[in-house]
Amino acid sequence: MRYLIAANWKMNKTVAESIDYIEIFKDLVKEVEGVEIMIAPSFTALSSVSILLEKTNISLGAQNMFYVERGAYTGEISPIMLTELNVKYVILGHSERRHIFGEKDELINKKVLTAVEFGLRPILCVGETLEERELGKTMNVVERQIRAGIAGLEREISLIDIAYEPVWAIGTGVNATVEQAQEVHHFIRNLINDISKGNDKDTRILYGGSVNEKNASELIKAPDVEGFLVGTASLDPQKFYKIILSS
Ligand code: PEP
């Protein structure tokens, strides 16, 4: 299994800024082998970035998607709009979508099913809030989000990657410790192995939450951490490159 190191630029970078970044970054990583690299820019930059990523070792991702092919859904992006641009991955259920935009497990599940139907590879994000962790509910929350998110794809879980992103660690500068990450990743691996009846070997479990060029080499030592989803530190090509080198 090749680890996946993915960048989530969120609502950052104009088209011009995205192009500048990719010009630098694709040269930095051109010799990198053994890990898969993904970048998810803003929707407006997808088209330009897609052209620049042709014949590189970097995959393209989208940060969200709607679950219908076309129609009267003002402001939404459909799966065929993504596949047309050679988008391979789609981040679904990110905690900012859940908490700021009110996305529920049921909606996220529809998006996951549609993404797979259209040949996109979802990265399903799950994770507990600080309050849930303090109440000892971490595993319950993660299990609920996974079971609901992948409902209908239990035997095809290999078509999905999962990102464990504790909400308290996202964008806060406070990352999970190696032990905390490993505990949840191990739980997720056992859970998806059980749900899929052993068909989970191509599903990577990424860690996300304040990963940076200083803590990546430590976090990747956790045996069940199989890549990263990186927000803030991915906005700088040099920092993101160093994270990739540490992995
Ligand atoms: C994210 O948004 O998925 C994320 C992990 O952000 P950050 O790296 O900034 O914590």
Image: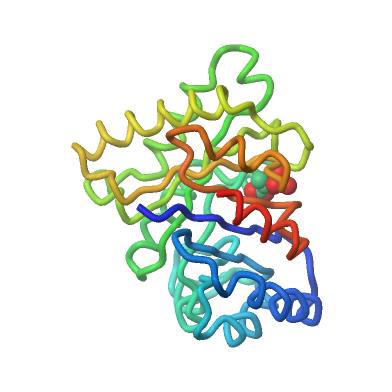
The x and y percentages for residue 108 are 48, 49
Position of residue 191 relative to residue 72, above or below, is: above
Looking at the image, can residue 241 be seen? yes
In the rendered image, residue 153, in percent from the top left (x then y), is placed at 28, 49
Location of residue 71 in the rendering, given as x and y in whole percent from the top left corner = 50, 76
Residue at 55% over, 72% down: 31
Instruction: Out of 209 and 211, give the one closest to the viewer.
Output: 211
Instruction: Tell me where residue 245 sits by quadrant.
Output: bottom right
- In the rendered image, the vertical position of residue 81 relative to residue 152, given as above or below: below
Single out the residue that lies furthest toward the left.
197
Q: Which of 94 and 102 is in front in this view?
A: 94
Count how many numbered circles sit on residues in the image: 0
Asked if residue 191 is positioned above or below residue 235 in the image, the reply reads: above
Q: Nearer the viewer, residue 117 or 7?
A: 7
Instruction: Say if residue 96 shows up in the picture.
Output: no
Residue located at (55% from left, 55% from top): 5
